[in-house]
Image (cartoon, rainbow, N blue to C red):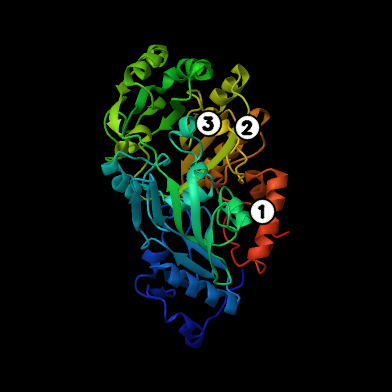
Amino acid sequence: MTATHHTPSDLFALSGVRGPVLRPGEDGYVAEVTGFNLAAAHTPDVVVGATCADDVVGALRWATATGTPVAVQATGHGANYPIDHGLLITTSRMTDVRIDPSARTATVAAGAKWRHVLEAAAPHGLAALCGTSTDGGAVGYTLGGGLPVLGRTYGYATDLVRSFRLVTPDGTQHEVDAGHDPDLFWALRGGKGNVGVVTEMTFDLLPLPRILGGGIYCPGEHAEALLRTWANWTPTLPIEMCSAFSLLRLPPLPAIPEPLRGGFWARVAVAWTGEPAEGEARLAPIRAAAPVTVDTVTEMDYTAVDRIYMEPQDPLPARESCALLRELTPEAVDTFLSEAGPAATDYPLLLVELRHMGGQLARPPRLEDAICARDASYFLETVGVLVSPEAARAVEEATLSLQSAMSPHGTGLTMVNIHGTPGDERDRARAWTPEVYARLGRTKTTYDPDNLLRYGHTVGSA
């Protein structure tokens, strides 16, 4: 993309923004643009550190007036695409969380992390449908649909959204719900940030203070026995059991506890929302499938949900990808193991995971949305750490090889939040069905006719 050169007089229109307005080379610029995923080195011409909705309005009006393309970042967990030139709006200062205990709702600002939400909701015995890491941003996660730890029991995070406050690229503020701007409300629930910048979101909470959860870890050489047991076990489960099978090749870092540090592990991560005794009983086949080295499954406060998947807490450069699977047949298991199992020596991916879908994730939405994953039975995710150019090439080759090998068992679609680095339009469109993608394009044309929001995983205008 060609650089946009802004003079001091051009930038004077941003002087009313309360947060910092920074350009390359100025103090604080690098820290402002850097997100959790260090694989994307952002170099915008201007970054605005928004503190409130009015800052977002001012930044978007300036962008429209100057024809400057716009990107948005809260925590940067999904920073898979480098922002080159243009304007970056960061919302990490907008962390307000308000809980209404009687209505069982949370209203969160654009930069609030799930950790902020859980901490505010817990004193009221309430919980939120967060993902596998509470360090992620609640709004960005939900805009992409939101595949929760407890998804089989309660559905997608988007299913619980009541309303959004949104600023469209022309600087207009909207209050959006099922009865107001319904097309915008539809596009924001699963269509990511293609039509504007969300400054606030209100959603339902769950009366769920405690769950049974954790991980059952076996040495990686027993991956086949554990995976085949898990694949046969999952179709028998009620919706209260949410689980995933993972292959983990962990680096020898102090942040990783012993004895897991530096090892190759097969893990079944579980979250059970029913009676703890029944959950423990249902885990018997998994615990008997292979020698168990570490078993962290226990009753826990929901605020401790990070213990289940134990995702990295420190920023790192990562390449992630995903695919939606129709089935997990014995043939699919064979393919998975041949690609990523114990025989794959020097395998470069940190994580290869199969998440059990179905349950409430398969129910039709109460209100029509842009999620296109309800027909999937399993979800395949990979993560590789890009520690060097050589490692990056190996990660890319392994990622593409596994995705290609598993494609006969897939729906052909991905989920936008974990799609990974967006490619050309054909690749980006794989996060939705052709019909939903076309409708998103028409909605984008209506609200962003100049395609200012064109960084990252965007849709093409109709």
Amino acid carrying label 2: it is: Asp
Q: Nearer the viewer, residue 31 or 410?
A: 410
Q: Is residue 315 visible?
A: yes
Residue placed under numbered mark 1 in the picture = 440
Q: Is residue 11 above or below residue 144?
A: below
Using the rendered view, name the quadrant where residue 405 is placed: top right
Residue placed under numbered mark 3 in the picture = 360
- Which residue is situated farthest in the front direction here? 102
Residue at 30% in and 37% down: 304
In space, the residues marked 3 and 1 are separated at their CA atoms by 24 Å
Q: Is residue 45 visible?
A: no
Q: In this image, 372 relative to 214: left or right?
A: right
Amino acid carrying label 1: it is: Leu
Residue placed under numbered mark 2 in the picture = 375
Amino acid carrying label 3: it is: Gln
Give the mark nearer the N terminus: 3 vs 1: 3
Dot 2: within a 10 Å radius of its alpha carbon, few (fewer than 14), some, or many (20 or more) residues?
A: some
Residue at 61% in and 53% down: 187
Percent position (x, y) of residue 370?
A: 62, 46
Percent position (x, y) of residue 303?
A: 30, 39
**Which quarter of the rendered picture does the C terminus lie within?**
bottom right
Q: Is residue 277 above or below residue 32?
A: above
Say what secondary structure mark 2 lies in.
Answer: loop
